[in-house]
Image (spheres, rainbow, N blue to C red):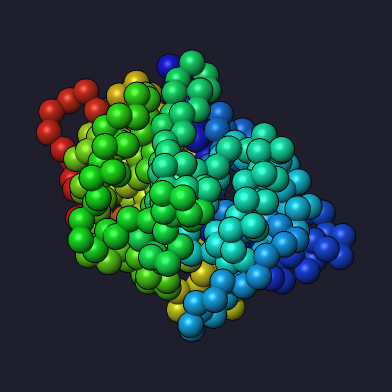
Amino acid sequence: MTLTVALAGDTMLGRGVADLLRRGRRRLFADEVVDATRDADLCVLNLECCVSERGRRWAAPGKPFFFRAPPSAVAELRRLGVDAVTLANNHALDYGPDALADTIGHLDEAGIASVGAGPDRRTARRLLRMDAGGARLGLLGLADHPEDFAAGPDRPGIAYADLRDGVPDWVTAAVRGAEADTTLVAPHWGPNMTAEPVPHVRAAADALLAAGATLVAGHSAHVCHGVAVRRGAAVLFDLGDFVDDYAVDPDLRNDLSMLWRVTVGPEGPRRVEALPLWLDFAFTRLAEGAEAEWLRRRFRDACAALGTPVRERGGWLVVDVPDGGAGAAAGTAR
């Protein structure tokens, strides 16, 4: 029994993307990208905005960016076949608790589950279980920033976890109690625009695997990072971006990203595949030519730094994960 999970990183449907949607733009993704997401048994991404027509900007000194999408944006998530999103990030509360509540409501109406945020701390920290193909996936969302977005006992917000001081007990307890064939942790961790995972992110990945997570898929850097593998487990340190209107760094090339597909079996992940993407302004398509080659080279180098070999098959970059039924760890998240 195997299950395929499509994963995508920061999906920002606000600001310039929202302007196009309000003017009638209906497509944010090329058909080939949609075909790839819908081909998986499940599709999960990080929704880096709120979806609402309400709210006021979060009153945080020095906060530079505020992302809010119109309700029509949810139609594009449905077109992708998205099953669940994580809202544990630094934009879920950009327009306050009313907009967060609207976001969850619009997603619910579209049949899209959400994790990592909610009307109170208990809800925000709740692990979601999804069934597909006779297998059960557990999904947990969390973010290590910003602290002022943290949900409280009776306060809306995100599932905040200060990973610089280690992985909090509530996170390890949620992972250990997942009752799932595959436990996916989706952390929004580390700083923006980094070429590789920072030390506290690497340490947190080790702790999550030790707690029993079999798949860790992070985001926040806006740049794809490498993959680390252990027997029956994999860490995708950063999924990169999926759609946005962001300025492009000429060295880090945050306009080049990946769509990810993970094949999991009873013993955990068996294979991680990455499909090169090019992110134009508010439109994502497959990368080709020099851009695709740059991204392949960049990904191979990032994986090599983590001791992970990469091969190619049918346009996808492939990382094989050692069988979880055998022996000791093969490599570490460090």
Residue found farthest to the right = 24
Residue found farthest to the left = 328
- Residue 107 in picture, x, y percent from top left: 66, 43
Q: Residue at x 34, y 29 (%)?
A: 178
Task: Please state which of residues 234 and 211 is positioned toward the viewer in this rendering.
Answer: 211
Residue found farthest to the front = 154
163 is higher (above) or lower (below) than 274: below
- Residue 186 in picture, x, y percent from top left: 41, 47
Q: Residue at x 46, y 29 (%)?
A: 129
All told, the count of numbered labels is: 0
Please indicate, yes or no, whether residue 310 appears anywhere in the rendered image: no
In the shown orientation, is residue 130 left or right of residue 289? Answer: left
136 is higher (above) or lower (below) than 310: above
Q: Residue at x 32, y 37 (%)?
A: 174
245 is higher (above) or lower (below) than 299: below
Screen quadrant of the C terminus:
bottom left
- Residue 17 in picture, x, y percent from top left: 72, 66
Screen quadrant of the N terminus:
top left
Please indicate, yes or no, whether residue 327 appears anywhere in the rendered image: yes
Task: Please state which of residues 230 and 187 is positioned toward the viewer in this rendering.
Answer: 187
58 is higher (above) or lower (below) than 333: below
Q: Residue at x 46, y 34 (%)?
A: 128
- Residue 54 in picture, x, y percent from top left: 72, 62
